[in-house]
Image (cartoon, rainbow, N blue to C red):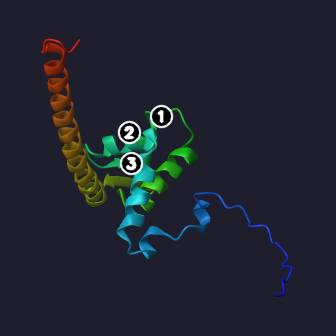
Amino acid sequence: MRFVKRKIVPKVKRPLTPPHGLRILHYMVNDSSEQLTTVFMALADPTRRAILERLARGEASGTELARPFSISVPAISKHLRVLKNADLILHRKDGRTHMFRLAASPLRDAANWLEHYRQFWETQFDSLETYLLDTSEKEQFTDDTPGTK
C-alpha cells in the first residue's frame, strides 16, 4: 500500500451570516424558509419593530418615521431598506416624499410559523405538568404511608 502526501489547504473562514451584498436577494428565492429568515432578521431590531408599530396605524413618510428616533437619516434609511427587502413594508414615491406602509403578508407567515411551535410547546408543557403532578402525588403518598420514614 502506498501513501501519498497531500498538501493540506487551510479552509477559508467565513462568517456565519454572509455580508449583505453577497446574499441572494429575497425576491430571487422562492424558498419560504429564506423569506422567514429575512423577516425574523428584520424583526430582531427594536428600531425596526417600532417603525412597524407606527406603520400599523397607517401610511407615513420617511421623515415622520425618523422623527421619534435620535439616529441619522442614513441610519433610518438603512432600517427602511431592511424592512423593504423583507417585504414587511411597501414604498412609493409621492413627488420628493417617500411614503411607506405596512405589508401584512410576511408578518402573517411568521405568525403562522410561530403558532405551529406554540402548539408544540404547549403540548410539551402539558405533558410535563401531568408528569410533575403524578410524581408529586406519588411522593406525597410515600411520605404519608406509615413506616416509610
* Residue where numbered disc 3 is placed: 61
x, y (%) of residue 146? 13, 12
Q: Image point 43% across, 59% down: which residue?
A: 38
> Which numbered disc, 2 or 3, marks the residue that appears first in the sequence?
2
Dot 1: element: loop
Q: Which residue is mark 1?
A: 69
Amino acid carrying mark 1 in the image: Phe
Q: Mark 2 belongs to which amino acid?
A: Ala
Measuring 20% from the left and 36% from the top, which residue is drawn there?
131
Task: Note whether 20 is above or below 114 in the view shown.
Answer: below
Question: Which of labels 2 and 3 is toward the front?
Answer: 2
Residue at the bottom extreme, as displayed: 1
Reply above or below: 64 against 135: below
Indicate which disc, 2 or 1, sits on the residue closer to the N terminus.
2
Counting residues from the start of the chain, the first of labels 1 and 3 encountered is 3
What residue is drawn where x is 44% and y is 36%?
67
Q: Amino acid at mark 3?
A: Ser
Say whether residue 94 is visible: no
